Image (cartoon, rainbow, N blue to C red):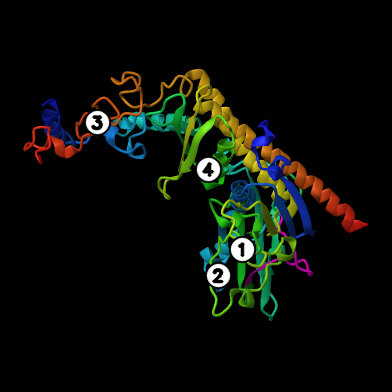
Amino acid sequence: MDYDPMVMDDAEALGPVVKISQADSVRVKYELSNSDIAFANSLRRVMLAEIPTIAIDLVEIEENSSVLADEFIAHRLGLIPLNAEGVENLLYARECDCDGCCEHCSVKLMLHAKCTGDENMHVFARDLVPVGERVNQVLGTPVFSDAEGLGPLILKLRPGQEVKLECIAKKGIAKEHAKWAPSAAIGFEYDPHNKLRHIDLWYETDAKAEWPPSEYASWEEPPQEGEPFDYDAVPNRFYFNVESAGSLPPDTIVSEGIKVLQQKLAGLIHELAEGEGDGMNGDYNGPRSPEYGTGADGFGGYTTPFGNGGNQSSWGGAGGTTPYGTTPYGAGQSNWS
Amino acid sequence: MPRAKARKEEPAEAGSDIVMDEAPTSHQPESRDDMSVDQDEDDEVEAEDDEVEEEEEVQRVRLLPGSTPTAASFEFLNESHTLGNALRYIIMKNPDVEFCAYAIPHPSEAKMNVRIQTFEGTTAIQALEKGLRDLQDLCDVVSDKFIEAREKFAATASS
């Protein structure tokens, strides 16, 4: 941004700051400061719902003699996290030239299990095997985060029961269905001492004693005794806790979130630049009010749709008069006097 | 009084058939011709094919009626608070902008409206484009800072 730093808050002129407090393979906790709540919330929303991942979307059941209904199993399969590494090289099925699905827009997985022993059999995500060509060798493989490497339990089979099915995993975003969410949960917190009073804490006798302090309470200055309320204060430190569901590592979720936001903006800039040439936006040839440019009052635009020359009330008064002035009784004048 | 006459006519006008332009913009018909339904059955297959191609070029931003160069309302399709609030904030940061606000007129329509009013010397469209670019720059900075912080964290965690 090339705005004069003088007009900005001192802190904001320094630009945003990121501090990581904890990071491992399932979560990243970080603090975003010198930023606005509008941007921080956009980042949270985009990480939650708009990062593309891959999930099972179509299930063809050949054999199902288990106790569970076909659609019940299909739903469970959809929710299994699949490795989304390299999903950017996969096409959305709706954008692919193929008829239905192909290796450029989907990953095929097979599940075939039959209980031949005399003990109940457990079918895990591990038994789901990717088949055929793939964009890369890990995309679409179920994620195993448990110690045994089995993955989530899909169903159980009694002796003699069998399931045989074929799944098509497709690319999508969580805005369409939550199964495509890369994150399990995103913690988002600011103002741990509630100095801004955005929260109205319920209490029996004393809110301070009854509510546990936030994990980040020690990060910020507690309010002084008898400190007056600062009505100009705005939140500017945001604590994120991004927890991965397994399909993408947590740091990738953050970078991908920013990337998706960037792509959103780039798409709109492109469209704006394009529109300027053909006059759709640049020359105002688009839809506009009928009076624009010909407004009798020279004001142009912004007329009421009632066609009486803009900036007048729709009651036909010449401005300033109340509609009561034109009642048949008064012929335009108040007859009170 | 000419006013009295105008007064008489208008309720009749408003009470009778409502002109489509008077409806809220979200209720006005799309400019695309929807009459293709009535066409012969033979043409229908072709018409459908055409429509599929048309859909690929759906315009996602449009100027709403009643806009002037320095005061304009934009309608974004398939956008939400995710973009709206951040864009509003960054456009408000522009000192040439007098007013900026966003709204989602109805929660079950995937539409987001942004109103921008600028001072003389710039246009609302320029302000919008600058806002989009500034938000991109902000994303770049945060992205860089995150990567930097991640490397720093990795270095301290391993040592």
Residue type of the residue flagged with mark 4? Gly
Which residue in the structure is indicated by mark 1? Answer: A194
Q: Nearer the viewer, mark 1 or mark 4?
A: 1
Indicate whether B50 appears above or below A189: above
Which of A92/A193 is in front?
Answer: A193
Which residue in the structure is indicated by mark 3? Answer: A319
Point out the residue furthest to the left here.
Answer: A329
Using the rendered image, report if marks 1 and 3 lie on a common chain. yes
Q: Residue A196's spot in the image, x, y percent?
A: 59, 59
Which residue in the structure is indicated by mark 4? Answer: B84
What crowding class fits label 1: few (fewer than 14 Cα within 10 Å), some (14-19), or many (20 or more)? some
**Residue at point 8% right, 32% down?**
A331
Q: Residue A85's spot in the image, x, y percent?
A: 73, 48
Which residue in the structure is indicated by mark 2? Answer: A201
Residue type of the residue flagged with mark 3? Gly
Point out the residue furthest to the front here.
Answer: A337
